[in-house]
Image (spheres, helix red, strand yellow):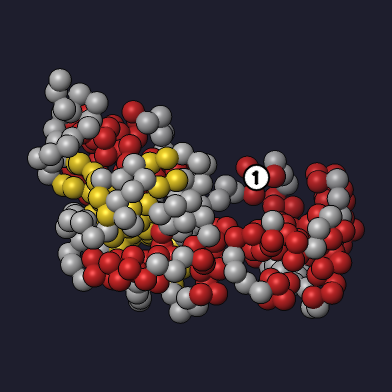
Amino acid sequence: MNQIEYGRVHVGADRTIGFYLVDSFNMLPFISALEPLRIANRLSKKPLYQWRIISDDGQQVTSSSGMIQTADMSIADAQEFAMLVVSGPFHPENFANESVIKWLHDVGETDTVIAGLETGCHLLAQAGLLEGLQCTTHWENMGDFKEAWPEYKVTSDVYEVDQRRLTCSGGAASMDMMLYVIEQHHGHELAASVADSMIHPHIRNAGEPQRMDIKSRTGVTHPDLIECIELIEANIEQPLTPAELADLVGISKRQLERLFRRYLNTTPARYYLTLRLETARRMLEKSSMKIIDVAVACGFKSAGHFSSRYYSSFGVTPRDSRKT
């Protein structure tokens, strides 16, 4: 059987891509990055790409969903690749494998292009591979990344390309990043054909935002209310009062109250508080920030007030939420 019939190429490809996986890696960004390579081979009927799966010790790794992925080699046996794609763990703040960090640093000294998928950019940052470069990570991990590396230029875009480093927010954005890579290697026509085969009608550019716009996320269509929600989301640490929100949007406080009641069945203050508490819960679950620092980052002036509000909303204390 022709080895390119399905797009699988085992030897003799133009480029070899290494995928480093660690236990609790996210399967979606990994598959979203690998499949475009296979489809590019199939559609072009040429051995453009082959790939190798790497783990710490060459043994299988388990994804966050419990799916098992076999590995082709260990980091000690890893060869030189045209591109190395790093997929990080679910809790990157707990990653402390010095052998991996040294290996990544050494690879960074070569001409290999290195990409970080989702939390993979945290590992790249630990290895010193993002200094002075623009990068991104998943929006849920953004707070922890900025706290750990406040000097880094991190954005909320779907992916970033800076010199020989690519970083990606994860999920389906890995597909967009790899389509960009294919386009750079083999032109727009092939990249577009791969996207079409994957039922991916819009290839996002590096500068596009990770999250859906407010209208899509909330169903709100009123422009004044959309602007108000944008202001709320941009001012979590220093919350604005309803009067300040109304003034910035250019409407009266009474009009603001009416909009929230009509479209969201709540008040501006309640909506604001709910958003701050949900943000706090994500930070507790996805970062290693101290509870008091989470409280301050979400606009609460004391740990006691934060804990009381948190318990009233979720039925558990912030400390219990972190343990869970």
Residue 278 position by quadrant: bottom right
Q: Is residue 13 left or right of residue 266?
A: left
User: What residue does disc 1 label?
Assistant: 217
Amino acid type for the residue under numbered disc 1: Arg
Whether residue 278 is visible to the viewer of this picture, yes or no, is: yes
Horizontal and vertical percent for residue 120? 41, 59
At 44% from the left and 75% from the top, the residue drawn is: 152
Q: Is residue 284 left or right of residue 250?
A: left
Horizontal and vertical percent for residue 70? 34, 42
At 40% from the left and 47% from the top, the residue drawn is: 61
At 65% from the left and 45% from the top, the residue drawn is: 217
Outermost right residue: 254
Q: Nearer the viewer, residue 313 or 1?
A: 1
Residue 99 position by quadrant: bottom left
At 16% from the left and 47% from the top, the residue drawn is: 15
Instruction: Quarter of the image for the C terminus: give it.
Output: bottom right
Q: Nearer the viewer, residue 173 or 68?
A: 68
Horizontal and vertical percent for residue 302? 81, 78
> Considering the numbered disc 1 on the image, is that residue within a helix, a strand or a loop?
helix
Instruction: Quarter of the image for the N terminus: give it.
Output: top left
Horizontal and vertical percent for residue 143? 57, 67
Q: Tell me if residue 133 comes above or below residue 174 in the rendering.
A: below
Q: Nearer the viewer, residue 82 or 75?
A: 75
Whether residue 183 is visible to the viewer of this picture, yes or no, is: no
Q: Tell me if residue 85 comes above or below residue 231 in the rendering.
A: above
Q: Is residue 193 left or right of residue 242?
A: left
Outermost left residue: 12
Q: Is residue 308 left or right of residue 228?
A: right
Number of numbered discs overlaid on the protein picture: 1
